[in-house]
Image: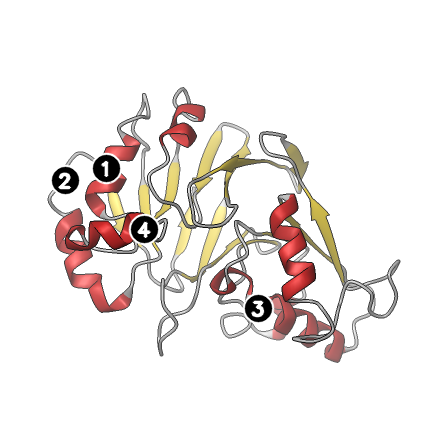
Amino acid sequence: MKVKVLGSSGSDLPGHNLTSFLLDNTILFDAGGVTNSLNLKEQQKIKYIFITHAHFDHIRDIPFLADNIIISGNKKLQIKVFSIHEVIEDIKKHLLNQKLWPDFTVIPNEQDSLIKLETINLHQSFEIEGFKITALPVNHTVPAVGYFIQRGKKFLFYTGDTGPTKKTWELLSNVVLDALIIECSFPDKMRRIAKMTGHLTPSLLFKDIENLKFPPKKIYITHLKPFYRKFIERDLQKNKNYHLEILRDGDILVI
């Protein structure tokens, strides 16, 4: 697996792209920082988008990606957007609703539309481009999932936004993860606001993954609030038990 980090920031500031990860050039996980990270040719390679939840920083570039592809004149492309029922309904109602943005699920017509919204079920695995992908529930302020991704004997879990979520780790407890991409939005001194908003601090993160029987081989940290980055880094460094790396936009992970 090759994962390109298009965006790994928990806030939208110059030099900090919103959440988006590109798997093997064709599969997106979240769509916050796509169109300012990829050129048009690269955008046209995207076939699938898996959304973790409907907060704007994770879906923002779906409309702009669709607009770019339509304007490019390539009428043969179609992008399938996957998530659980609640997320798909929010995208229909609040994003591609003919008010905030044209509804690309019916342009140029419903059958040949550029965007296809597809509902998936929790815990139900299916295969795309040689990857087996499973949506697992996580703990956020709105309905949200993370994605367990398998290819051969390689295993990756991407949490999206999540607060403490013991149940999720229990579902993965017998898996040896080659990589865990997990959010850590706030430093430990902001533990209260992190829990209120469905996010993690370093100490909450470490406590949560203790529920895994086997530690991940590599833990990649994402979704840091840039204002608190140095404090988050300091708190993360207190724990020496894991192989940690804080992600930056443009990083390429080979798993």
**What amino acid is labelled 1 in the image?**
Phe
Determine whether, in the image, residue 150 is placed left or right of residue 65: left
Q: CA distance from mark 2 to mark 3?
A: 35 Å
Measure the C-alpha gap from mark 2 to mark 4. Answer: 24 Å
Dot 2: element:
loop
Going from the N terminus, do you reach mark 3 or mark 1 first?
Answer: 3
Q: Which residue occupies 72% across, 48% down?
A: 118
Label 4 vs 3, first from the N-terminus: 3
| Nearest to N terminus: mark 2 or mark 4 | 4
Q: Nearer the viewer, mark 2 or mark 1?
A: 1
What residue is drawn where x is 69% and y is 60%? Answer: 92
For the residue marked with disc 4, what is the amino acid?
A: Met
Q: Which mark is residue 239?
A: 2
- Give the position of the C terminus as an image quadrant: top left
Q: Position of residue 117 (x, y in %)?
A: 72, 53
Q: Are marks 4 and 3 in contact (CB under 8 Å)?
A: no
| Residue matched to label 4 | 196
Mark positioned earlier in the residue sequence (2 or 1): 1
Q: Is residue 2 visible?
A: yes
Q: Which residue is mark 1?
A: 206
Q: Mark 4 and mark 3: span between their CA atoms?
A: 27 Å
Q: Position of residue 219 (x, y in %)?
A: 31, 42
Residue bearing mark 3: 61
| Location of residue 42 (image quadrant) | bottom right
Type of amino acid under label 3: Asp
Whether tag 3 and tag 1 are in contact, CB under 8 A, the answer is no
**Closer to the N terminus: mark 4 or mark 1?**
4
Distance from the alpha carbon under mark 2 to that under mark 1: 8 Å
